[in-house]
Image (tube, rainbow, N blue to C red):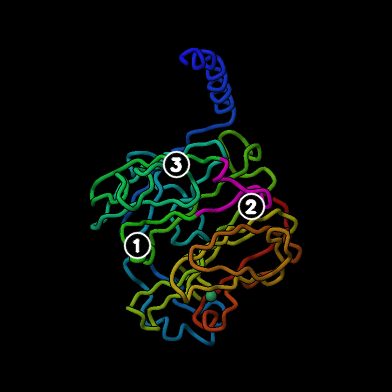
């Protein structure tokens, strides 16, 4: 009996070594430092309806600034230098990136006044790194920190019909409904093995630009219509800026949604179509916690609408613009 196992030892060593060598070639441990913080958030910093100025902001303009809770990325464990973030990311937490084979180490500091967590979709974790439902990382008390370990395995990466990178949500999950509505939301982008630009840059090599858009209605006043903020990345009525690209660039849109039964959105671009897993369209349907990634190569110069095609949502300001210019980088 025992000899059976002894015979297998060399095979096991070989297997272990090949695993280690394959990991050492591709794998990286990617560390992020994220603090949860209270912050003042203005849904329309210009104070204007930038899509249809004559219409104004309607009831949704009665109050624009609220206290939100946000995930803020920092460069290191001092939590003093914030990671730079493009304007179009709006209220989203830091963009986490990895390639298949990597490990994500997420250091979390709760600087707020309520217990919070980070719960990821898609990646592999043990109970303590689930950020929900009873493990050690399920509820991090005010002032406390915790490190989550997430394995970016094959099953966290693009499937056979997916593009070379795909998007996953992460969000707080102590009282999930409350905390996503407070603003504790971000995304993870995972690139297929062998498709990363370099060991230090997991962005896909076959894409020039990646954008993320969260379509979500934030409920600020217990369901009063004036407090139902129909946002793209936390902005309304064209107040999200920075979706800027160029003719001929390979652009990937990571589309996510969260919220309630009213968060059924039909995301529409003017001026351009997208390739959605082999389907050509210019409207992509999302539901709460949907995550999908679609591609385009802009063909027409302009300052184009990007909006939800549900009538009520359009009226409530769920729109912005994306810009295509002609110049080369
Ligand atoms: Cu909508």
**Mark 2 vs 1, N-terminal side:** 1
Which disc number belongs to residue 179?
1
Residue at 34% across / 49% down in the picture? 35
Residue 146: say if magenta.
Answer: no
Horizontal arrangement in the rendering, residue 277 relative to residue 286 (left or right): right
Whole-percent x and y of residue 162? 66, 52
Residue 228 locus on image (x, y percent): 41, 78
In the image, residue 14 above or below residue 306: above
- Residue 140 spot, x, y in % from top left: 27, 49
Counting labels gives: 3
- Check if mark 2's residue and mark 1's residue have beta carbons within 8 Å: no
Residue at figure coordinates x 38%, y 47% from the top left:
130
Local crowd size for mark 3, using a 10 Å CA cut-off: few (<14), some (14–19), many (≥20): many
Which tag is nearer the camera, tag 2 or tag 1?
Answer: 1
Q: CA distance from mark 1 to mark 3?
A: 21 Å
Quick one: label 2 or label 3, which is nearer the N terminus?
3
Residue at image mark 3: 150
Where residue 306 appears, as percent x and y from the top left, is 61, 71
Q: Which residues are magenta?
A: 154-168
Near-viewer residue (320 or 32): 32
Q: Tell us which disc is closer to us: 1 or 3.
A: 3
Q: Secondary structure at mark 3?
A: strand
Asked if residue 212 lies left or right of residue 111, the reply is: right
* Disc 2 to disc 3, C-alpha distance: 25 Å
Residue under the point 55% across and 28% down: 23
User: Residue furthest toward the front?
Assistant: 1
Residue 220 vertical placement versus 24 (above, below): below
Mark 2 surroundings: few (<14), some (14-19) or many (≥20) residues within 10 A: some
* First in sequence: mark 1 vs mark 3: 3
Q: Which residue is mark 2?
A: 209
């Amino acid at each position: 009996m025992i000899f059976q196992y002894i015979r297998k030892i060399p095979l096991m060593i070989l297997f272990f070594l090949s695993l280690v060598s394959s990991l050492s070639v591709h794998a990286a441990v990617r560390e992020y430092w994220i603090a949860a913080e209270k912050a003042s958030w203005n849904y329309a910093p210009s104070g204007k309806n930038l899509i249809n100025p004559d219409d104004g902001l309607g009831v949704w303009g009665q109050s624009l600034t609220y206290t939100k809770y946000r995930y803020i990325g920092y460069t290191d464990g001092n939590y003093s230098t914030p990671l730079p973030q493009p304007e179009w990311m709006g209220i989203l937490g830091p963009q986490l990136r990895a390639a298949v084979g990597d490990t994500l180490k997420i250091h979390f500091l709760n600087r707020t006044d309520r217990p919070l967590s980070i719960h990821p979709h898609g990646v592999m974790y043990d109970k303590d790194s689930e950020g929900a439902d009873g493990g050690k990382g399920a509820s991090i008390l005010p002032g406390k920190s915790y490190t989550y370990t997430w394995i970016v395995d094959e099953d966290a990466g693009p499937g056979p019909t997916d593009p070379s990178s795909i998007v996953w949500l992460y969000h707080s999950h102590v009282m999930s409904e409350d905390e996503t509505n407070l603003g504790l939301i971000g995304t993870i982008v995972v690139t297929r093995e062998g498709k990363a630009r370099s060991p230090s840059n997991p962005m896909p090599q076959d894409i020039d630009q990646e954008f993320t858009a969260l379509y979500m209605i934030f409920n600020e006043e217990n369901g009063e219509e004036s407090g139902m903020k129909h946002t793209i990345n936390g902005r309304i009525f064209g107040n999200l800026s920075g979706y800027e690209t160029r003719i001929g660039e390979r652009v990937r849109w990571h589309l996510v949604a969260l919220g309630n039964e009213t968060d059924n959105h039909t995301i529409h671009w003017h001026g351009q179509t997208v390739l959605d897993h082999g389907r050509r369209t210019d409207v992509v349907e999302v539901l709460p916690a949907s995550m999908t990634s679609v591609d385009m190569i802009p063909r027409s110069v302009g300052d184009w609408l990007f909006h939800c095609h549900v009538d009520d949502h359009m009226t409530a300001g769920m729109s912005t613009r994306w810009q295509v210019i002609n110049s080369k980088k």
